Image (cartoon, helix red, strand yellow):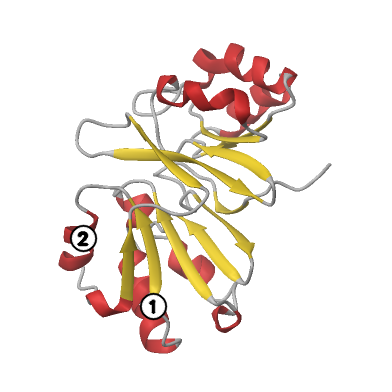
Amino acid sequence: MKENLLKFIGNDSGFGDKNNSAYFEQNNELFIIDCGYTVFNEIKNRFDFSVYNNINVIITHLHNDHAGSLSQFILYMWFVYKKQVNVICNCKYIREYLDITGTPSCAYELKNKLENLTFIKTKHTDYLDAYGFVMNINNKRILYTGDTCELESFSPYLNNINELYIDLSKFGGAHLKVDDVLGTLKDLKNKDVKIIPMHIDDKEYVLTLISKL
């Protein structure tokens, strides 16, 4: 079986031990997707950051388990590696978030778009804006939902992807309840779309259902 295009740093729900985060490497660039409060300690010794021409962090939303160590990572890259981080984010308050967490503007470049990436606004909670995205990687197309409680926002993109990284929960609420989307996931798998669960609250329950698609 071919490896997923994205590698996970962690895929736990917000109350788990390893915050949901993934990465990929392309053309001497490192792309990290979300940087929650556990992520900095996970990546600090995993990568030799000196070998990359660019360090990019895509932020889907500003919950602590997705952006909680973003400032720490930017400061680390700036003071230890003398490198500026590209922060790719469409969230309304990302600049204010970085300001109040003490992140000097010289240490990062903020972008709301990226070549080959399209942000998709979704619904997660009423308290903040949240985004998933579609992106082309190595001539393949992925859809990454981020945290979401609905799939409707992503419907226009589902028929043109190779891999679906999808927030799945046993209990639902602010996240997709796995039982409610099994039919859609089965249809996608029958079209040779690879289904990769993430942000999982009950791994045994969710992964067992997905394995039976």
Return the residue at label 2.
95
Q: Residue, x 46% and y 40% (percent of image)?
A: 133
Q: Percent from the top left, x then y, of residue 20?
A: 48, 48
Vertical side of 152 occupied by 72: above or below:
below
Viewer-nearest residue: 201 or 117: 117
In the figure, residue 104 lies in which quadrant?
A: bottom left
The numbered dot on residue 84 is 1
Q: Percent from the top left, x then y, of residue 26?
A: 63, 63
Q: How many marks?
A: 2
Q: Residue, x 54% and y 46% (percent of image)?
A: 11
Q: Amino acid at mark 2?
A: Arg
Looking at the rendered structure, the secondary structure element under dot 1 is: loop
Task: Return the disc, 2 or 1, that comes first in the chain's sequence.
Answer: 1
In the figure, residue 15 lies in which quadrant?
A: top left
Viewer-nearest residue: 16 or 137: 137
* In the image, farthest residue toward the right: 1
Quadrant housing the C terminus: top right
Q: Percent from the top left, x then y, of residue 47?
A: 59, 74
Q: Percent from the top left, x then y, of residue 172?
A: 41, 23
Left or right of 145 on screen, residue 109: left
Marks 2/1: CA–CA distance: 15 Å
**Marks 2 & 1, CB-CB < 8 Å contact:** no
Q: Residues within 10 Å of mark 1 (few under 14, many from 20)?
A: many
Q: Amino acid at mark 1?
A: Gln
Vertical side of 204 occupied by 54: above or below:
below
Viewer-nearest residue: 115 or 80: 115
Q: Residue, x 56% and y 84% (percent of image)?
A: 50
Vertical side of 131 occupied by 193: above or below:
above
Quadrant housing the N terminus: top right
